[in-house]
Amino acid sequence: MSYRRLDASEIVNTLRALESRISERFPGSGLSAVCRELISVGELTQRKAEAIAVPNLWLRGLVYIVLIAGIAAVVFTVLAVTQSIELHMNTEVFGFFEGIDAAMNITVLVGAALFFAVSLDDRIKRRRSLTDLHVFRSIAHVIDMHQLTKDPSVVDERSRATAASPKRTMSRFELTRYLDYCSEMLALTGKLAALYAQSLPDPVVIDAVNEIENLTAGLSRKIWQKITILESLEDRETRAGSAQRS
């Protein structure tokens, strides 16, 4: 087992354990459904990332064919010019420069074809990776939506709900656990996205993965601000209770 690379199976196992915890604590909740969806995505991520990293044999074959054809064309041109010079000694200088010009044109065309074939493989891999990574960005926002209405101030006795307020029936402990589950799911979403950068170290893909990790980290910080508020409210009530007993 390597400790230098992320293992998708271990990430998925962690997600399964998290989904069990969410389902046991909050049966039938939407958050557990989101976690199950993330498990399904995670199960496909390793295969997709590895498949994207595999070289395209058809394009590689095309590169070799173009390279061989280019070399053959240059050799043919040089031989043709040499024979022309031998047959027409008076045009030796003009034939030489014509041969050089033809060889340079062929070299430029072969180089352009090689660049197109090689860059085409990179563009295909990049497009597939960015399409797959968009799923993780969407899931991160879905997770954020589930914690959006989880207001820590509602556990404060001084808070008063209005007619338009959403129903909030969680205790302080349950609300803390719910928020913590959301934070864990965001972290694991970022880890699944990182598998693409691990399999395909393309600068554009790496930037997209970093963007997703920054997104999940930012959303997680927002969640932990709520958890910190809950902990501060608990500390305040504990101190108030101690003061009354004394």
Image: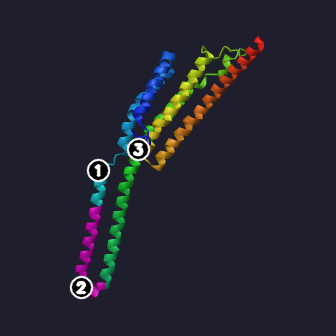
Q: How far apart are marks 3 and 1 (CA)?
A: 20 Å
Q: What residue type is labelled 2?
A: His
Magenta segment main secondary structure: helix
Q: Residues within 10 Å of mark 1 (few under 14, many from 20)?
A: few
Estimate the x, y position of residue 11 in percent, counting from the top left. 44, 32
Q: Nearer the viewer, mark 2 or mark 3?
A: 3
Q: What residue type is labelled 3?
A: Ser
Q: Which of marks 3 and 1 is nearer the N terminus?
A: 1
Quadrant location of the N terminus? top left
Q: Where does label 2 land, which residue? A: 88
- Residue 189 left/right relative to 125: right
Seen at 27% across and 58% down, the residue is 65
Q: Alpha-carbon neighbours of circle 2 within 10 Å: few (<14), some, or many (≥20)?
A: few
Q: What element carries label 1?
A: helix
Q: Which of 138 and 89 is in front in this view?
A: 138
The residue that appears at 48% across and 50% down in the rendered structure is 203
Whichever of callouts 1 and 2 sits on the residue coming sooner in the sequence is 1
Per the image, the residue denoted by label 1 is 58
Q: Mark 3 points at which residue?
A: 199
Q: Is mark 2 on a helix, strand or loop?
A: loop
Can you say which quadrant of the picture contains the C terminus? Answer: top right
Q: Looking at the image, which residue sits at the far top?
A: 245
Name, please, the residue furthest toward the bottom: 90
Q: Which amino acid does label 1 sit on?
A: Trp
Residue 196, relative to residue 115: is it above or below? above
162 to the left or right of 75: right
Closer mark to the observer between disc 1 and disc 2: 1
Dot 3 falls on a residue whose secondary structure is helix
**Residue interval drawn in magenta:** 67-92
Q: Is residue 26 visible to the viewer in this orientation of the structure?
A: no
